[in-house]
Image (cartoon, rainbow, N blue to C red):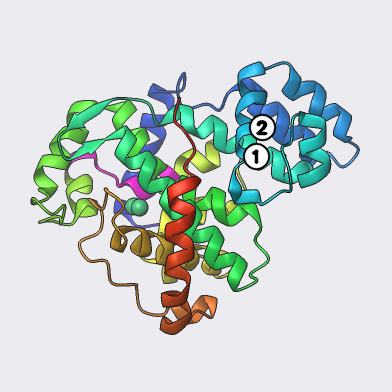
Amino acid sequence: MTTNAAAREQKVREALSEISHIATLPEITMQIINLVEDTSSTAQDLQDVISNDPALSARILKVVNSSFYGLPGQVASINRAIVMLGLNAVKNIAIAASLAKLFRGGDLTPQFSAKMLWSHSNAVAIASKVIANELQLGLGDEAYLAGLMHDIGIMLEMQYDRNQLIDVVSRTGPDINGVPANDMLEVEQGVFGATHEDFGRGLCVQWKFPASFAAVCGHHHDPMTAPEEHRRIACLVAVADRVAANIGSCYRLDLLSTEIPAGAMDEIGLTEHLLENLIPQIEESLSTDELSIS
Ligand SMILES: [Fe+2]
Ligand SMILES: [Fe+2]
């Protein structure tokens, strides 16, 4: 490991230990993850845990009933949701619902707020899922969640040191069209001593998330550098990130250019023509399926 990489890792550890009270997933989410990973668990076990949290139950039902899942008729109970979608999908919805809570934090500057980043993350999640489904990548909701999480390192920066993030945003200097003047990752490196890719990857490790999420968070700006076994999902989210920026998602502070990184399309088997055909579907889904932050 180079001195630079070691220093960045040290910085991530320092930040995570300082904000450990916020940088933890809610207890109930951890319980759900553990339960679903335990092969002896039943749908009833999952239902029992979720029923303890009415707010989470309500949120899950809202997501289940969104057009995103295309289920016939209204699903009124968690039990039914589990039957219709399976344990794994419900687990992923619970994680997504927990993530929403981490994106609270108000306006930082006129160019950046937690809400803008949440909208952007939703757009990337939706684009990731639409593209993954079309290409039959077999990723299921993992594509959606990876998209939702890819920039989570920025929220970690916000909670670790708000003023430093304000500094990063102003030095990155988006113009009136939201096009950044400088490379946010370089600016972050100068201000924080690490980038949102580093912070995001560190958070995934701390949360014991699958290694694919750490790869996406840690490599979405340069996806061909992701470990080979997770390169495909990193490329998928990198493509979705640029697509979301191009179709008017209000945040692109960390993208100097919206050009798709070389090799990423080939890695997932996507052509320009197919992508163009998918844009209307992504736009349609964006208008109806954003998870609410509250
Ligand atoms: Fe990013
Ligand atoms: Fe992004």
Instruction: Return the residue at label 2.
Output: 61
Instruction: Work out how far the residue at label 2 is from the one at label 1, CA to CA, in angstroms.
Output: 6 Å
Helix, strand or loop for the magenta stretch, by majority = helix
Q: Give the range drawn in magenta.
A: 191-200
Q: Which of 10 and 274 is in front in this view?
A: 274
Look at 48% across and 46% down and name the residue there: 288
Locate residue 69, reporting x and y percent.
Answer: 65, 50
Q: For this view, does 183 lie left or right of residue 241?
A: left
Is the residue 235 above or below the residue 200 in the image? below
Residue 275 seen in the figure = yes
Q: Is residue 207 visible?
A: no
Residues at discs 2 and 1 in contact (Cβ within 8 Å): yes
Mark 2 is surrounded, within 10 Å at the Cα level, by few (under 14), some (14 to 19) or many (20 or more) other residues, namely some
Quarter that holds the N terminus: bottom left
Of 230 and 100, the residue lying toward us: 100
Would you call the spot at circle 1 few (<14 residues within 10 Å), some (14-19), or many (20 or more)? some
Quadrant where the image shows the C terminus: top left
Q: Quadrant of residue 91?
A: top right
The residue type indicated by label 1 comes to: Asn
